[in-house]
Image (tube, helix red, strand yellow):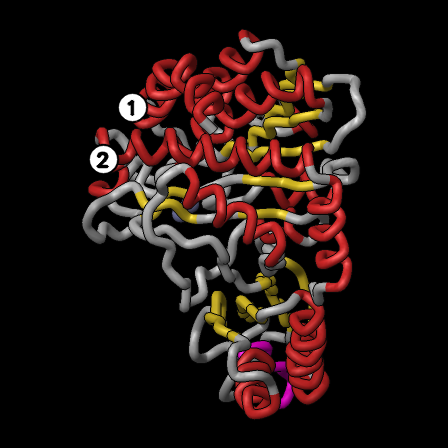
Amino acid sequence: MMEIKQRIEEIFSELVELNEYIYLHPELGLKEEKACKAHVDILRKYGFDVEEQFIGIQTAFKATYDSKKAGPTIAVMAEYDALPDIGHGCGHNMIGSVSTGVGIVLKSYMETLGGKVIVLGTPAEETDGAKVDMAEQGVFADVDVAMMAHPSSKTSISIESLAMEAIEFEFIGKAAHAAAMPEKGINALDAVIGTFNNINALREHITSSTRIHGIIKEGGVAANIVPERAVAQFYIRATTKTYLKEVIEKVKNCARGAAMATGATLTIRNYEKSYDNFVKNNNFNNIIEKNFDLFGMGPVEERKSNLGSLDAGNVSQVCPTIHPMFSITETDIPAHTRAFAEATLTPYALQKMKAVIGALTQTGIDIINDQELLQAIKQEYNKTEK
Ligand SMILES: [Zn+2]
Ligand SMILES: [Zn+2]
């Protein structure tokens, strides 16, 4: 452990600079050009092979170090997108700096221990998560485990996030004078209203943690014209991807039924990327918890509430993944605020950043050194409901 600390110390000033540079130049999702370049520069300097514009995404990258000796492939994920108006209120400047630090230190160990480490630059977590495309396109097919850590007010190992799908229903009816010739019209708005009513009836027969929430985007243009076109958008969320699929089919049937009843035609589409639920792995969480303790991360809290949805959820559907939250504040500061952005620069936060780099690096080393541990993680993973 002392040796890991020493190796982190050797590069730490560069990581602090990276953290501050990204804080000072906040860029929105898919526009993180400065942040991406800053990561790529430092990783190249430390001997990584870097592929820029990875999978065709301008601000994504894949930095690889292959020891060419037998051993696991470990991916660390760097986020670096900011929020409109409030900059790095989610602390993603720190996520990128932590993952880059872990990559560089882990590489120095892999030179003798074996294995392969990949640092992935994953843009746009707050909007159109690049991890969704990466998971879909098989980027993690040869990855044994994936890691990242997210700054927060509280330290917690195990996170929960819901599988989420964004579905739009577009109904096309037939316009007609609503008073003189209503019998000639087909009312698309009635189809939308029917959909909402059907969904409200469906709520009685789905699990209580499932969420279906929607809006009417378009509902006609004038009260004296039978609405020709009406559009509704919904988010549907559930604790597992499998159950979500079941619910989505039922929700679609609610819209299909309403279309049939009114005579409107229905088009169904996804209007945003779908995020998957986060698949928990107790064996993996246990090592990270041990190493959080080893590096003095302080008390770990049980996370009780759901986080909404994360694009790391999609990664956890294709390989064992950890996404612990680490406390960078001494008092409670909510995320997505300017105060939280500022907190990423304090000496307290930087000390935690150093500790979390140590804990993740140690976790990588544990996995390289103990094949049974990796087997246990994988066995649990294969058995877990997704
Ligand atoms: Zn956020
Ligand atoms: Zn975040």
User: For residue 58, which quarter of the picture?
Assistant: top right
Instruction: Name the magenta segment's main secondary structure.
Output: helix
Residue designated by label 2: 342
Residue 264: in sight, yes or no? no
Residue 54: x %, y % from top left: 66, 25
- Residue drawn at (54%, 7%), measured in percent from left and top? 45
Residue 279: in sight, yes or no? yes
Q: Is residue 230 above or below residue 285?
A: below
Q: Which mark is residue 24?
A: 1
* Along the line of sight, the residue nearer the viewer: 106 or 47: 106
- Residue drawn at (76%, 48%), measured in percent from left and top? 375
Q: Nearer the viewer, mark 1 or mark 2?
A: 2
Instruction: Assign a secondary structure to mark 2.
Output: helix
Q: Give the total number of marks visible in the rendering.
A: 2
Residue 336 on the magenta span:
no
Residue 263: x %, y % from top left: 70, 83
- Residue drawn at (60%, 30%), measured in percent from left and top? 120
